[in-house]
Amino acid sequence: MLSRIAESYFWIGRYLERAEATSRLLAEHHQLMVEERTVPEELAAAVLLDALSLPPQSATDAGDLVTAVVGNSSDPATISGAITMARENARGVRESLSADVFEALNAAHLAGIRGPIVATSPAYALYRVVERLAVVVGQIDWTVPRDEGHLFLSLGRSLERLDMMARVLAVRHDQLWPEGGPVATLRSAASLNAFLRTQHPLTGDEVRRFLLLDPDHPRSMRVSSSNAEEAVRGLAARGASDGGDLLREVGLLRSQLEYAVDPHPEEVDGLIELVQQSSARASDVVAAAFFRPVGTIVWSN
Amino acid sequence: MPGRRLRIQHRTGYRYASPVVSSFNEVRMTPLDDDGQVLIAHELRVEPRAAVLVYTDYWGARVESFDTHEPHDVLEVIATSTVDTAGGYHRAAGATWEDLASEKVLDRWCEYLVTSSYVDDAREDEHRAGLVDQLRACPTPADAVDLCNEMVRDRISYASGSTTVSTTAGEAWDAGSGVCQDFAHAMLSLLRSAGIPARYVSGYLHTEEEALGETVRGESHAWVEVWNGGWEGLDPTNDRTVGAAHVLVARGRDYADVPPLKGIYAGGASQGLGVDVEITQLRR
Amino acid sequence: MPDVDSVLPAYQEMDGDLADVDAVEALKTVLAGLGEEGLSERGRLIDAYFNRQGITFSLAGKERPLPLDLVPRLLSAAEWRVIEQGVAQRIKALEMFLADVYGSRRVLDDGIVPRRLVASSSHFHREAWGIEPPNGVRIHVAGIDLIRDEEGVFAVLEDNLRCPSGVSYVLENRRALAHVLPELFSDQRVQPVAEYPERLLDALLAAAPAGVADPQVAVLTPGVHNSAHFEHAFLARRMGVELVEGRDLYCRDDQVWMRTVRGPKPVHVLYRRIDDDYLDPVHFRPDSVLGVPGLLNAARAGRVTIANAVGNGVADDKAIYPYVPALIEYYLGERAILPNIDTYDLQDPEQREFVLDRLDRMVLKPVDGSGGYGLVVGDKATDAQLATLAKQVQADPRSWIAQRIVRISTCPTLVDDGELAPRHVDLRPFAVNDGDHIFVLPGGLTRVALPEGSLVVNSSQGGGSKDTWVVAEQDHSVQYTPPERPTPRLTRVLAAVPARVHSPTTHDERMRQQENQQQQSETPQTDSQDGAPC
């Protein structure tokens, strides 16, 4: 597989995950801001923007926050931007991606997040986005060959999922809204039911531990790191190996999460930070090892 | 005029401000094995080392192409050739103005009758337009060529470093000074504008007449060939016919068709290493 | 000088002498059955289909579908034979011309084509001189633009021998039409077009350097922002080869490599859809970031085949075009099957004067233009435009050619109000040369000038397209003859097939009822009389 194509697959994976996770997070965060007016809107908005590494806005209320995070096609840290970038990457690899995936992504991009519904019911509009993205992911599952491209896409998804989960946890809904916060965090991570089945008390600390270490939930950091490791091993088995740095990075992370036994809340915080750093490093290693070694070369004569 | 056996070593290259990781180059430094000139031996050395592809281009020159991908600060090219020079051109039949205006000549030598990268239309410049008229007024094209040689020598004085490799005929004419390349271009411009097919020749000049076995500094040189019922050589820089001391390397419309070394690279600014030509006469 | 002054009516295709009457009638019956409303509905479906598939071209920075007319253009088998043979003949001669120009130059010495026209062609690349393609093919793919004159005769408008585009529309138009108007096909025997990618791949493989056991083919695209990127991706996908950009490739020691996640992989045949000027910064534009440095010399060394070959543009130069019939005679000893349109050499003073005297009855085309840009149709231009044009022609006659205004043929076309009306069309058949055989894809791209009366069919100038059907002759259709002995039925399979496995029933009827009751009992009871006693 061409390095450029692999790179696009990787980023399609990352952006799909980013758009989806950001949509869920925004919908739930917005819901809390509206429902539980105990926290000043400006503060609540600033916290989310900060967690998403978006520039702080002046005079923000819940509506402004939605506008900022839905964003526009030119900023890939926003939902619109992430979808646009996923499509841009898909455009460049259209011939190797299945036509169905591209069509689904194209539809998600064309549908966009627009219209009065965004203002009247942001949650409705955002879950429409999630649905659209689900179609894309479904088409990927159904139609994309399990070759290097798919492995790079999975690796991208796993690394982004780790990063996004760290951002979800960075918001600290439980501290802002002790009542509804923990549930909102779980809903942001689509894991409320899974958590409730564990019979753990519904506290902020328990929720954080769950989302970090649960061995079964597909969005827990532990499972994501294990998925990342699997993708890296799959690539190596197909002859695409960087010599071991990448496997070391993701393997170490996976084992640290796998063997963390009942950590204290402070240890949980430390591990979350570790995850975010490690996933960023892994992403850099991937880029250096497999993707375009240089940017555009400028020739002189 | 009998020819000479000469060994020529041509050394040139570039120095780069920052290491170059990739570079593609073409060298035109092999003397022609044609028209009475005989190439005995030729060797190209490149530093950093590279595999060389050899081919003959449209104009008949032998091109050596190579690429290198080792980081390097300096690219050096050394071409060493041994050649028996022809000792001059056969005298052409001599053409009339009518001959030159015939459809056959106009079509056959069309590339040497029009403007090219370095050679402008002299008629578009008031001063030179008058000179073109004078050339056209000569009884024969051969007379026009002689007159043209005088015109160029009257106007341009030899001054090393006064022009650059990219100076055009018009610019050299305005500057009034230049090197062999500029003399050649200026002459081509006038001749073509007067309807006389004329082309650019690059090569070497052995300056020492009596230096058998001795290695002397030579020059990378340029002169012109004009069509006078056949091609004849003329060296306007030295005001002489082309003879045993001239080594032919490549012909074309102008310098752009025959550069000794050209290439592209990825990296910082470059600086030419200069050109160093050494010529040894091996036998008469 | 030929007559250019009388204005003849355009030839009405599908009503002409050569048309396949049965096929046309069948088509008209189906269209009539749909009615105006039915047709506009299908029209909307087509647009939706193309948009969903992302089959668009970009025009002025916007992506839009190429409008496809619902009415196919029918060519009878007799009409097609002329085109097929004429296109193949022309390409054969142009191949020989290119081999000559980039080799011995005999054709110039013999004075068949003026050397000055070749030497002054901006697409004559001296850098490509001496490069010998492995199987002798330079025109791997050609698109020959044809029109039908007032008499219904197919004539060549121009040759496209560099990167002719549009073949993906031919395939996609067919698919789209079958998708939204399947009933049209029911009574027809249309020659298929879907085999094109296979034919192209075969031709590219046949062009691979000698001695390569398993040649790797790639399609080289300028990138996603190119207006024809859809087609590049389409062809790569349908051929099952990589679609590469310049930055995916590099040359080392005259071998071309592509960067993959498993390290470098050699490329042996490059079907490039990048102009010569951008292909190799060593020999052409040094500022090109789309190309691959060293590519040309890799081809010269015989390590990679560039398809189409570098420098083909000299043969489709509009100034060479008038000489193509002479080239066909010179190389093949045959008369051209497809005539040229009368074209005037504006460098010839007499012809130039003739043209300048009647500019309002001429079409003038810039020699270097394509896509209809810069083209001036005399009877549609203002006096001021014609005056400017006359000055331009006088200043630089080499840059223009002139042709008489041909009322190109019309085909019934669906217009805005749901009616069928005649609109002018041209035809670009696509041909693939594998070195042994020139395959002409049955049909080709029909472009139609949608505005009433317009003769300009280019998509950049408001043109649409039509699916082009070559109707197979009756005796060409496959007859099914039942085998003499009936094939024995396989019975063993029946015994061996395991029972279908289903998931266990999640709910039986009783559970469902009870769940329903539970649900009901949770809703507030308003009528206490129906409620069970506690």
Image (cartoon, rainbow, N blue to C red):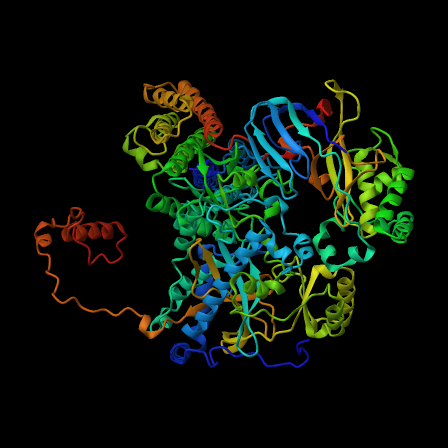
Residue at (74% x, 71% y) in the render: C382
Instruction: Tell me, yes or no, if residue C313 can be seen here.
Output: yes
Q: Nearer the viewer, residue C430 or B11?
A: B11
Residue at (43% x, 74% y) in the render: C78
Instruction: Tell me, yes or no, if residue B10 can be seen here.
Output: no
Percent x, y of residue B3: 73, 31
Percent x, y of residue A9: 44, 39
Percent x, y of residue B124: 85, 51
Examine the image and state in which quarter residue B186 appears: top right
Q: Is residue A94 shown above or below C350?
A: above
Q: Nearer the viewer, residue C148 or A102?
A: C148
Split into 4 quadrants, where in the image is the N terminus of chain C? bottom right
Q: Is residue C336 shown above or below B275?
A: below
Percent x, y of residue C197: 41, 54
Q: Tell me: B273 left or right of C43.
A: right
Q: Nearer the viewer, residue A15 or C516?
A: A15
